[in-house]
Each structure stands twice: as structure tokens, then as C-alpha cells.
Image: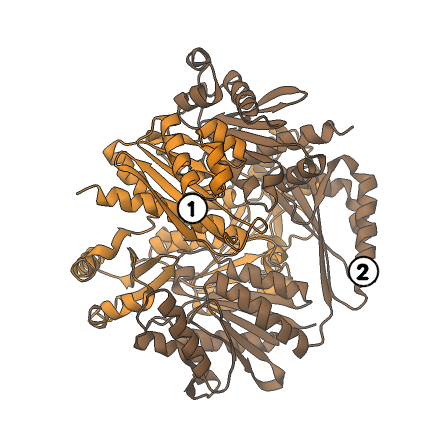
Chain colours: A brown, B orange
């Protein structure tokens, strides 16, 4: 089995100043190619720690990928540390130098000493040309054909280098077998009840297929994984058959596969049925609209929406009755229904989703505490509303209300397919 | 210096199925309390690897915090692995058992064997009671007063346990000194030019204060850090004075401090000036509205917005001239201006932000490639529009267009303060 370790470098990771998404991207690509990630490690901009970690990682991994610490400023030390580890001199790379100069000129930046240093590379590395940035990637081959790869920490630059340079080279360098990960998404059964229901199925899994439970609010994902597979096609068929068995055991709880989110499921249904959608959001403040519009192809069904934060916008843009707001409050079933119907009318869409709630931290009362959210869907089959309590923290409330409201439409779409 | 290692457990992390935000949260809290995070490690659900990693981590760290692997299903092995490492038997914790049963009853879940196992804990640990979930946290004291803490992987549960249980105990257990991190946000100077401008200042920094550059699109953050500080007040004053010096060197480039984002800066200005805001979004699809509404207190100034994805919504809800859409295209200066003015009129807000662009992957042309975004602000001082190229990837385009549009309003608000 070919194994890799991912090392992300930067004090900002250790003090919790940034969320590391680079290693997620790298792990996905490596797994897809059949390379198993043994460990992910984050360390500071510290030469001794970089050296120790790299050496230790290579005891178990043939491949080590390092991101970060390649900037032009003094706090970035990865390049010179690698040069020392590999007993390498530095040289000026003419092509990189020209590229850096040109990139900076386009952006109106003066080419100074610091930028010039970006073109210095260890003699013992192969340069991975970074068309999208000024810090080149580096490929070192060590003892026993072990590979060390250094990439810039800017996500966009790292991603291009991984796809265009690193992956093709790794696939040429190693004889790789497949890693297979297939995920089924279930809803409506909590983890423990799901596990009980499928226990006989789980116990009968072959030893080379591993099951994992990934619980999230309202949803549990079941992942089947097989590593270092010789007969990829055969094992894929086997996993498909195993999921097919679950289809007999928990048919009403299977909602999708792989990374499908609720919004992706709704996206697929609306696209295939050629139906349209709009949104009217108060407490979710645009989060529902932005989840749909984040997906390529949303313009096929998403008409638009209104973020009706102030009551006047609920009245003027959506036609909510101001007397009802006074009588029942902005966070009420009546207002949620009128918002959904109002935006459906305004945009002429087939379906509409609306939310109105108290995201906090202030604005709660005994009767309607922070986290209270009314949500409604307006559909050709009529309007439905429901009340959900979405937690106590503002971010959590917005996220849950967004998820629940989309789920509400999803269930309606499934039901009306009969 | 008291050091900690954070270990996150779960195959889903190593295959890139989830983004690890737990360790970010933990790192922030530890740093704030003066505990330095030495390393963050992610490993799989593998008993041998958990044991090796834990032992190695304790060679350098007095504290090891482990998250994940505490679910009721078979793939979760952290608890039993820790029991073996600490040579501990298991016992049934009555209080945890009652709590688990009660939690499940409220949610209508059957209390089965798997759930009961949640109440089993190693005899040698102290239970950290998890009021928000079914898996208890665990606190082990090992040799040399070393501490090992195991927490559930569900972010919300982990966060409560960290704040309510773990931090007070750590502060009682160790004599802690302060770690200080202060961040200044600059805009308008690329990293290399900024570094050149402040080089004499950087060279004169005292050895115990460390500078880091954190570049992001259009913004470079400068962080000054001091670890294990005895005289916290003195060093804080010193860092403040150092930032004061920068105020003389790059006065026009300093836009804020700490985690302030562009939207937070606009939030603060609008709140203090008692002015209101609305948004009209096409390609950003609600992302601008949701960045503002994610912040507590947004209702003080945010009136609402229109996500005008379909052209009919631009016309019907915002009053954009359909003849102008036909003549200039939906992605045009005229339409961006009319969208901003339209939503400002509709909501009666003081300021409005509008975007219209091509987020891709389809819809581009030679004249208007994917990534082309027109953005406009409508203000009491008039309407301005600008064209920005926001990249090639859909997510990146939405993010950048969102950031640039908010920044456009920010600069206008700064200019009109004179």
C-alpha cells in the first residue's frame, strides 16, 4: 500500500487563526488515486520541528506533502529548511524569475529583493512550475525512492499544482492500487437505532470492507471503504450490492449517495422536473439562497429571493400584512406562510421556501426563545408551515434553520412524486 | 511553557470527507489561556496508531486533547483504546446512564444496548459530563501529572465541554503564563511591498516578539505573537506601541485589527453612524446578505435584500429596465447600477450593494468570460459601479465578488467620513 503524510506548516494553524482546508483537498486527491493518507500533521514555522516531522513521516509514508511557509517574508522558512535537510545548494531558476517578474508587473507591484528570492530553489529539487502564483512547488526524491513535495499554502495555487503537476508524477512514480470509498446518506434514524437495524448486515461484511458511521444533525452517512484493492471493478460491484441489500432493510431512510447534501438533492429534483424555486428569508439572511446558488447549474431553477430582514421589507417586497405582523409577531406561522406565498407570487416560481425566526443573541422572549424558527414552503399543492427549535448559538441556528427548511421542501418533493 | 497536542481521530478526516474545525476551536481556547499548541495530528480509527501517537505527543506536551471516536457504533474505538493504554477497567456510570436514557426519550429514540454502552467509562478517568450529548468526555491523569483528555467529535458538544469543564480544570492544574497574539489588518500593499516598507521596523522587533505575514486576496494580516509571557500587561502595551509605530509608516493601509473582516468593519461603521444597508445580488446569490446577517446585531442596520437571479426578478422586484438588460446584457454596468438603486429604493436604506456577474462554469463569452462581475453601490452621495475579474472557479468567484463588493462600500464609507 502506498502511504502519504500531509504536513501543513504555519503558526496560524496552531493558534487557531485559520481553518486548514488544504489538507482536505490533498487527502481527497490522494485517496482517489489509491494513495492512503496515514496521518495529517500541522506544525509551526520551526526548522527543527519541520525536520523531525519530515523524517518521522517518511518512516511510514513513501510520500510526504508539505504545504505552506513559502512566502517571500522572513517568517517563511520551509524552502531553506528543505534545502538543508536534503544537503542542497540554492540556485536561481531563470524561468521562475521571469514568471514572477511578469506576474508582479501585471499587478503593478515592484520587483524587489524579496520577490526575487521566490525564484531561488534548492539544486536537488525538481521545480513544479506555479502558473498561478510566485512561489514554485518543489519535488525531492530521497532514499528508497521516497518523495517529498513542497507546495505553497495559497489554496488556489496549491490546488492547481496538485492536479497538474503532483498527481501525474505520483501516478507515474508508484504502482498504485485503488482505494474505494462509497457513502450512502440516511435520514430519519438516529445512529444507535440505525446500527441496531443493520447489525446483521454489518456483521456479514467481508473483512476487507470497512464500515463507518458519520452522524450529522438529522442525517447519518454510512461509508464503506476498501483500501489497496487489486480488483477495483469487482469490489465496486460488491459495495454496490451491499448498498442494494440496505435498500431492502431501510428503504424509506435512504436519501442519497456520496456528498449529496439536501440542497443538492433538491437541485437534482427541480432540474429534472423543470420546476423553479424562490426563497424568502428573514433569520437565515440569505443562507438558503446562497446554498443553492453555490451549485453550478442553479440558474436552471433558482429564480431568486428576498432577504426580508426588516418588517417593512416583509410588507413592501413580499406583501405580508402588517396587521398580522402586529398581531402575531414577525416570528409566527402566519408570517412564514405569507412570506413563502409572497415570494412565490413575486417571482412566479413553482416552489418557495421561507424562514422567520430569532437568531439571537438578543430578541428572545419566554414565549419565543432564541432559536425559535417558523419555516414554510409554498407549492402547487398548497402551503405548509412548521415550527423548529434550532439551538442556542447564532451560527448554529442559521445553519440548522437553513438545513431544516431545505429538508422540508425535499420531503414534499419526494412525497409528490408518487 | 505548558504545551499541548491536539489529536483528531477519524478516517473521514484522512480521506478528506470532512473539514476539521474542532482543532481550530480548541487551539484558540488553549492559546488564550497561555497553553501553546505544539502540534495538531489527525489519525484514523486505529488502536495501534492512537496509542503510538498519544505516547509520542506526551514526550513534548503535558496536555493531549483527543476528539472523536466516541460514538456508540463499532467503528468508534477511542474509549476502549484509552482504557487499555491506562490499564483501566470499565465501569457503568449511573449518572451518565440516566442522562443518556433521558436524552433519548425526549427525542423518541429507543434506549438499546448500543446507547447503554455510552455510559461505560474507564475506572481510571474522571467523567466530564456532557449535558448536550450522549458521549461523556474523559480526563486522565498520567505520569508526571500529564493530562489526557478525550472529547466527543460533535462540534457543539465538544465546545461546551471545552469551555465548561476542560479549561477551568487545566487552569487549576497548571501554572500558566500568557500567550499573546495581536493582529493588524492591512490593505492595498502586496506582501512583498509591505515587507519592504516595514523592514526597519521588523528588524528592530525585540527577540521575544514574533512577526507573521498572513496574506489573503487584497488584504495582508500582520500578527505579532509573544509566548509564555510573565508580564502580560507590559508586553501587550509593547505590542500596542509597535502597532502604533506602523501607524506612522503605513497609515493609509491599516484597515483594522484582530479578526475584523471587511463586513465586520462595515457593520461597525453603519451601526455607529445609524445608517442602513440593503443588497441586490445576482451572481453572489445571497452570499453578501448572509455575511452581514451572520453577525449578531445586523438587524440594527441591515434592512434586507433581493437575490435577483432570474432577469424577471431583476425587472419585477428591483425595477431594472428590461430594455437595458436586452441592450447591455444582465452583466453590465447599467444593470448593476439599476439593481443597487432599485433595492435602495425598495427598502428605503441609506446604502445598497449590488452584484451581477458570471459565476460559471457555463455562461461565459469572449467578451464577458466566466469571472466577470459588475458591482455597484448606491449611496446618499450617488451611485458607483466597477468591473472586477474574480477568478475562474465558481466558489472562488462568488467569494471574491462578495469580498470586493463589500470592500467597495467600506472604502466609500471611509472616504465620506472626512
Tell me if mark 2 has few (under 14), some (14-19) or many (20+) residues whose alpha carbon lies within 10 angstroms of its own.
Answer: some
- Rendering coords of residue B299 (x, y %): 36, 30
Horizontally, residue B230 falls left or right of residue A198, namely: left
State the residue in front, A337 or B173: A337
Residue depicted at 29% across the width and 67% down the height: B193
Asked if residue A174 is positioned above or below residue A381 in the image, the reply reads below
Tell me the quarter of the image containing the N terminus of chain A: bottom right
Residue A105 falls in image quadrant: bottom left
- Measured in 3D between alpha carbons, the distance from the residue under mark 2 to the one under mark 1, in whole angstroms, is 50 Å
Horizontally, residue B170 falls left or right of residue A193, namely: left
Give the residue number, with chain letter if any, for mark 1: B374
Residue depicted at 49% across the width and 85% down the height: A86
- Rendering coords of residue A88 (x, y %): 46, 88
State the residue in front, B138 or A410: A410
Give the residue number, with chain letter if any, for mark 2: A235
Residue B48 visible, this orientation:
no
State the residue in front, A308 or A393: A308
Residue A168 falls in image quadrant: bottom right
Asked if residue A226 is positioned above or below residue B287 in the image, the reply reads below
Tell me if mark 1 has few (under 14), some (14-19) or many (20+) residues whose alpha carbon lies within 10 angstroms of its own.
Answer: many
Residue A56 visible, this orientation:
yes
- Rendering coords of residue B114 (x, y %): 69, 42
State the residue in front, B120 or A379: A379
Asked if residue B231 is positioned above or below residue B287 in the image, the reply reads below
* Chain letter belonging to callout 1: B
Asked if residue B230 is positioned above or below residue B312 in the image, the reply reads below
Tell me the quarter of the image containing the C terminus of chain A: top right
- Rendering coords of residue B374 (x, y %): 42, 46
Tag 1's secondary structure? strand
Amino acid at each position: 500500500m502506498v502511504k502519504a503524510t500531509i504536513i501543513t506548516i504555519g503558526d496560524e494553524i496552531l493558534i487557531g487563526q485559520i481553518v486548514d482546508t488544504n489538507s482536505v483537498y490533498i487527502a481527497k486527491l490522494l485517496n482517489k488515486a489509491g494513495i492512503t493518507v496515514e496521518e495529517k500533521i500541522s506544525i509551526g514555522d520551526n526548522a527543527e520541528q519541520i525536520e523531525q516531522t519530515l523524517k518521522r513521516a517518511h518512516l511510514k509514508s513513501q510520500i510526504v506533502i508539505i504545504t505552506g511557509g513559502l512566502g517571500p517574508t522572513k517568517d517563511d522558512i520551509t524552502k531553506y529548511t528543505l534545502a538543508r535537510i536534503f544537503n542542497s545548494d540554492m540556485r536561481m531558476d531563470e524561468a521562475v524569475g521571469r514568471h514572477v517578474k511578469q506576474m508582479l508587473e501585471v499587478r503593478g507591484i515592484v520587483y524587489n529583493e524579496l520577490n526575487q528570492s521566490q525564484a531561488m530553489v534548492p539544486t536537488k529539487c525538481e521545480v513544479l512550475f506555479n502558473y498561478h502564483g510566485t512561489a514554485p512547488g518543489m519535488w525531492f526524491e530521497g532514499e528508497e525512492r521516497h518523495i517529498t513535495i513542497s507546495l505553497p499554502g495559497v489554496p488556489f495555487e496549491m490546488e492547481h499544482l496538485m492536479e497538474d503537476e503532483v498527481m501525474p508524477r505520483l501516478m507515474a512514480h508508484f504502482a498504485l492500487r485503488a482505494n474505494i470509498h462509497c457513502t450512502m446518506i440516511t435520514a430519519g434514524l438516529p445512529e444507535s437505532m440505525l446500527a441496531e437495524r443493520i447489525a446483521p448486515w454489518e456483521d456479514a461484511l467481508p473483512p476487507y470492507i470497512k464500515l463507518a458511521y458519520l452522524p450529522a444533525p438529522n442525517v447519518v452517512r454510512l461509508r464503506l471503504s476498501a483500501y489497496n484493492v487489486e480488483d477495483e471493478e469487482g469490489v465496486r460491484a460488491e459495495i454496490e450490492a451491499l448498498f442494494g441489500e440496505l435498500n431492502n432493510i431501510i428503504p424509506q431512510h435512504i436519501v442519497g449517495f456520496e456528498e449529496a447534501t439536501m440542497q443538492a438533492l433538491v437541485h437534482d429534483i427541480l432540474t429534472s422536473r423543470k420546476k423553479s424555486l424562490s426563497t424568502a428569508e428573514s433569520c437565515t439572511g440569505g443562507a438558503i439562497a446562497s446554498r443553492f446558488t453555490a451549485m453550478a447549474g442553479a440558474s436552471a431553477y433558482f429564480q431568486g429571493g428576498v432577504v426580508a430582514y426588516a418588517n417593512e421589507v416583509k410588507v413592501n417586497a413580499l406583501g405580508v400584512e402588517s396587521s398580522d405582523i402586529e398581531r402575531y409577531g414577525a416570528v409566527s406561522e402566519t408570517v412564514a406562510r405569507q412570506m413563502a406565498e409572497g415570494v412565490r407570487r413575486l417571482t412566479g416560481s413553482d416552489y418557495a421556501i421561507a424562514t422567520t425566526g430569532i437568531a439571537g443573541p438578543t430578541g428572545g422572549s419566554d414565549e419565543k426563545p432564541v432559536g425559535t424558527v417558523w419555516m414554510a414552503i409554498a407549492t402547487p399543492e398548497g402551503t405548509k408551515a412548521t415550527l423548529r427549535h434550532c439551538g442556542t448559538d447564532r451560527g448554529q441556528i442559521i445553519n440548522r434553520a437553513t438545513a431544516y427548511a431545505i429538508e422540508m421542501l425535499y420531503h414534499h418533493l419526494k412525497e409528490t412524486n408518487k
